[in-house]
Amino acid sequence: AQTVTQSQPEMSVQEAETVTLSCTYDTSENNYYLFWYKQPPSRQMILVIRQEAYKQQNATENRFSVNFQKAAKSFSLKISDSQLGDTAMYFCAFMRGGSQGNLIFGKGTKLSVKP
Amino acid sequence: DSGVTQTPKHLITATGQRVTLRCSPRSGDLSVYWYQQSLDQGLQFLIQYYNGEERAKGNILERFSAQQFPDLHSELNLSSLELGDSALYFCASSVGDAGANVLTFGAGSRLTVL
C-alpha cells in the first residue's frame, strides 16, 4: 500500500520570503503521479502543482515549484515570494497510474504567512 | 467556482438518521470521487465511479453507499449515522478514470451528527 508522509504539521514564513514544505512517499509502483493541493480557510481543495514520476524535470507553476527526488521518494514544495493568500493547509498526494486514479493524501502542513 | 457542485453545504442531523449528499461533476468529466475529511483520519478516499460504474473502493463503511446516475451526477448515502461520521465530505471529478487525470474538488458538504 502507498503512504504519504508530511513531517511538518505547521510552518510559518514572513511575507515575500521563501518556504519549503516536505513530503515523502512510499510505493513499489513505477508509474505514478504526485500532487500538492492547497486548502485555504474556505475549505476548498485547490490544485497547486502536479508531477509525473516519469519526468525528471521538476514541475513549476509561477511561484510554486517542486523538488522531485524519485530515488529518495521525496517531493517537496517550494513557495517563493510568499503572499498572505498562501496561508492554508497544504496536502501532498500520490496517485498510482492505471485505471484507478484515486488520490492518497498526507496529513497536511499548516502554513501561515505573516505580514 | 471549480465547476463541481455539492449540495447541501451544511447538514446537521441526529445519530441513527440517514442523509444523502449530492454531487454534480464538472461538465465533460466522467469520473466522480468521494472523500471524507475528519480531524482524526485526515482525507480518506471513499469510492470512485466512472461513467456510472464503480471503479475503486477505499475506506467506505458498509453503512455508506454511493451511485452515479446516467446524467453523471452522484449521490453518497450515509445511514445509521454515528457521532464519528461528522466530517467534511468532498466530491471530486475528472475527465477519465486513469491516474493521469487531475481531480477537481467541490466545496464540500459539512455533516454534523449530534
Image: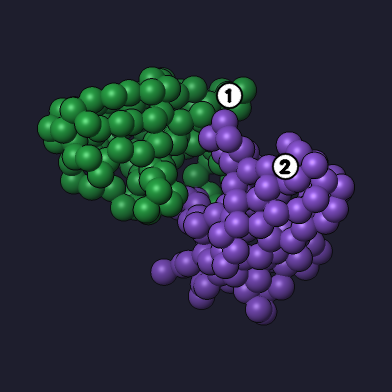
Labels 1 and 2 in the same subunit: no
Q: Quadrant of the C terminus of chain B?
A: top left
Q: Give the SS element for disc 2.
A: helix
> Residue at horizontal 60%, vertical 57%?
A10
Q: Classify residue A93 as left or right of residue A47.
A: left
Residue assigned mark 1: B3
> Residue at horizontal 59%, vertical 41%?
A39
Residue A100 lies, in percent from the top left, at 45, 52
Chain B's colour?
green
The coloring applied to the image is by chain
Q: Quadrant of the N terminus of chain B?
A: top right
Q: Give the SS element for disc 1.
A: loop
Q: How many marks?
A: 2
Dot 2 surroundings within 10 Å: few (below 14), some, or many (20 or more)? some
Residue assigned mark 2: A86
User: Label 2 amino acid?
Assistant: Asp
> Residue at horizontal 43%, vertical 40%?
B33
Residue B105 lies, in percent from the top left, at 54, 35
Residue B30 lies, in percent from the top left, at 49, 33
Q: Which chain appears purple?
A: A
